[in-house]
Amino acid sequence: MKLSYYPGCSLEGTALDYDKSVRAICRKLEIDLVEIPDWNCCGASSAHMTDHETGMRLPIRNLLLANPAGHDILVPCAACFQRLKAADKALREDPGFWDAGDYKPDFKILHISSFLAQPGILATMEAKVTSNLKGLPIACYYGCLSLRNPRITDAANWERPETLERIMTAMGAKPVAWSHKTECCSGSLTMARPDIAEKLVGDIVSAAVRAGATAMVTDCPMCQANVESRQSGETYAPAMPVFFVTELLLAAITGTYPSKQQKVHLVSPAALSRIFSDATLKKEVSV
Amino acid sequence: MDKTCISPDDRNEKFLRKLKARNIDVQACYQCGRCSSGCPIGDFFDLNVMEVVRLAGYGQEDKLLHSHTIWLCAACETCATRCPNEIEIAGLMDVLRELALRRGIAPAEPRIPLFHQSFLGSIRSWGRVWEIGMIANYKVRSGDLAGDMKLGLSMFLKGKLKLAPHSIKGTSEIKEIFSGKGKEYDR
């Protein structure tokens, strides 16, 4: 299977390891990822928040670049996914307004966890597991933009999504039932108002702890960075690691969680030490 | 918002037409309050979400553009998702921020638009966001030099921040996008 691939800027920087694990999982699934040639930033969220035209035309350029290949487009970042979906809808409705001529592609825009949670793909991955996640109590955290608003994302189940739960269950983890799986962590404000981000992240992590989770898993690079970096540590302990869904998939399939991967976390991933041998997983991660 | 006196004479018709053109039907609000009660940032707002929608319905552009709320909104879309009348409230917040910037109104939360401008400046230069450059630009503009130094250093040491930018080939197309090539720039 061939898919167009839109990594987005985070996956070239703070979430570089997310990009690597997405590519590795796709190789395991024999999916050929074709990066959209010369793609640009989709502008999320600053462009659409302050300038409608720029906020539309940045993702539109990517769609027009993906159009000739015609493959479905795989997007690991929730914010990029939402912007590409919004641009695709606007283009289909009125291509002339956006100077896009005759825009009628057959492709679909796919967010990673909805794509991976399809029964056929899930079964293939499950068959490849060499070290299952041994009932790891985990809080599946979606955040906002792969789901909302559903008039843009076409999400089937935006208040109680379960794609991450399905994937984690297939890997042998035990997703907890909790209250905050679609709550906003205020990633778009985190630099300018870290106080707000600390409050929201504190509420989210407290809810995960209350539900009995020892780790969180997400499919949004902003959520991953923001929730790991804005834990003030006063209301809950120990700190909560946040994994990418493909990071855990790759660990379960390969049966290893290499020290190089452990070190990219700002919060110690020691929650995995029960699953992957202690020899390969240090209790504390040094900065 | 107590004791606010609003007269129909103050209604900004141009603003209301702009909302209509963007399919943001603020008149459909029957004040159920779902938008405000679900808002994750609501505790920090000066106007709650429902008040924003109501003031927009009354055409009170100026009051809205001076508010903290329009800048503190994180664009999480919870309000628009839960509105029983499907009012595009997050889209309304986008319009308000854009108008405030175009009119040069001093933002009630100055650091937030400075962050947006640093972020967009990076895209304009390279076609993609280069995080170190964007953060340095924001720090200089906002004067918030000390904030998050430890976090930044830790991210840097973990190899999460790329030292050099990657420029796309089509930067001239990106510059054209930022110059307002289309039909949307007219108010």
Image: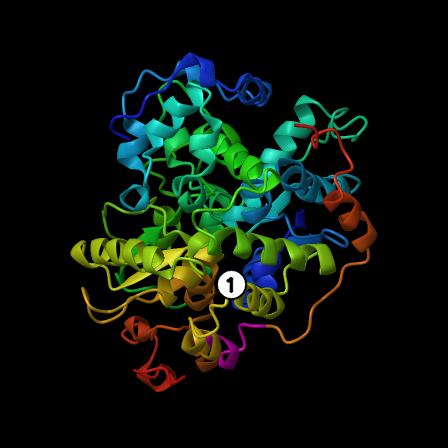
Question: In the depicted view, which residue is nearer to us: B34 or B47?
Answer: B47
Judge whether residue A5 is colored magenta.
Answer: no
The residue under the point 25% across, 61% down is: A135
| Residue for point 66% across, 57% down | B121
Q: Position of residue A158 (x, y in %)?
A: 38, 35
A212 relative to B52 in the view: left or right: left
Identify whether A30 is placed above or below A254. Answer: above
Magenta-drawn stretch contains B157: yes
Q: Quadrant of residue A10?
A: bottom right
Identify residue type, mark 1. Ser
Residue at image position (75%, 43%) is B177
Image quarter in which the C terminus of chain A is found = bottom left
Q: Position of residue B129 (x, y in %)?
A: 63, 60
Judge whether A122 appears above or below A150 on screen.
Answer: below
Highlighted range, magenta = B155-161
Residue assigned mark 1:
B142
Q: Image check: A217 left or right of A220?
A: left
Looking at the image, residue B30 sits to the left or right of residue A13; the answer is: left
Say how the picture is coloured.
Answer: rainbow
**Total marks in image:** 1
Which chain is disc 1 placed on? Answer: B
Viewer-closest of B98 and A97:
B98
Looking at this view, is A96 or B62 the one in front? B62
Residue B88 seen in this snapshot: yes
Q: Percent position (x, y) of residue A85?
A: 58, 36
Q: Write down the quadrant of residue B85 in the picture.
A: top left
Q: Residues within 10 Å of mark 1 (few under 14, many from 20)?
A: some
Q: Secondary structure at mark 1?
A: helix
Q: Is residue A154 visible?
A: no
